Amino acid sequence: MSLLETTIAGQRRGNGHAQVVDELGRAIVSGRYEVGSILPGDDELCAHFGFSRTVLREAMKTLAAKNLVQPKARVGTRILEKSRWNLFDSDVLAWRFEAGLDEDLLVHLGEIRAAFEPEAAALAARRADPADVARLYEIARRLADPSHNKASIAKVDLEFHLAIAEVSKNPFMLSISSLIEAALAISFKLSSPASDPVLISECAANHLAIVDAIAAGDERATRAAMLTVIGVGVDRTRRALRLGS
């Protein structure tokens, strides 16, 4: 299940392994288990979840792969320092959002997007073929649908930004897809353009400007258009967060 679905719609995965990972991950990131502390033992966790040791061990491997915990023989499973957590991981990002939103988090997400996405767009302007451009136009035009709801417009927006990364033809650009999804999930949950037909139209126009620049092969204009899209989203979300606080 995608980060957009878990953040916007509140849906969660349902199998035993996923349940254990989700509950423990949320508890760690929210601070219910303090950094440096040792998780409860296998017997206690198995009794709590009602799952076998095999399920529990696999869940611990998953959490360790996200750099949240470190198992040690004869010591137990220790919670790692926050600086070790893999914030590029979509689950860790989702748990971070649930733990509480703040303006610093929004700014940091905007900064990392601004560091990567304009360059991805510029590479797309350099490397896109006619089929790539046609695909980007098709996605951008779907953003203009006035019947969009919060979830549907977020999914199309994510599709657009991931398509830009693909068209850049740099495989490393796709490695930040979880960050893009995270930023869009939080933005569209707090303040979605779907609430106003005028905002939907503006959103579509801003994304079409990116494609126009790509089609023209104008790397500078493409960077600027992408920065505008990122900036509009960050500003809209920061205003919504301040009004809600």
Image (cartoon, rainbow, N blue to C red):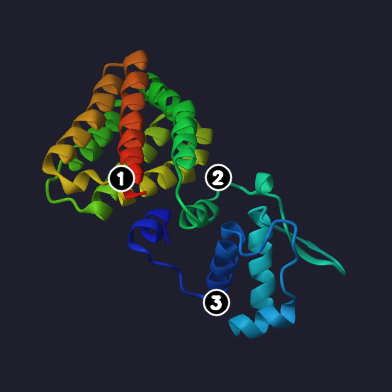
Which residue is depicted at the point 42% across and 57% down?
Answer: 2
Which quadrant of the view contains residue 213? top left
Q: Is residue 100 left or right of residue 36?
A: left
On the image, the x and y values in percent for residue 128 come to 35, 25
**Is 212 situated above or below 64?**
above
In terms of sequence position, does the residue under pointer 2 or pointer 3 come before the other?
3
Q: Is residue 233 left or right of residue 172?
A: left
Within 10 Å of disc 1 (Cα), the crowding (few <14, some 14-19, many 20+) is few
Q: Is residue 16 left or right of residue 233?
A: right
The type of residue carrying mark 2 is Phe
Residue named by callout 2: 88
Could you give the CA–CA distance between mark 2 and mark 3, rounded to whole angstroms? 24 Å
Residue named by callout 1: 243
Helix, strand or loop under label 2: loop
Within 10 Å of disc 2 (Cα), the crowding (few <14, some 14-19, many 20+) is some
Visible in this render: residue 158?
no
The type of residue carrying mark 1 is Leu
The type of residue carrying mark 3 is Gly
Could you give the CA–CA distance between mark 1 and mark 3, rounded to whole angstroms? 39 Å
Helix, strand or loop under label 1: helix
Query: In the image, which is nearer the foreground, mark 2 or mark 1?
Result: 1
Residue named by callout 3: 16
On the image, the x and y values in percent for residue 121 come to 38, 26
Which residue is depicted at the point 39% across and 32% down?
Answer: 167
**Is 40 situated above or below 133?**
below
Could you give the CA–CA distance between mark 2 and mark 1, rounded to whole angstroms? 28 Å
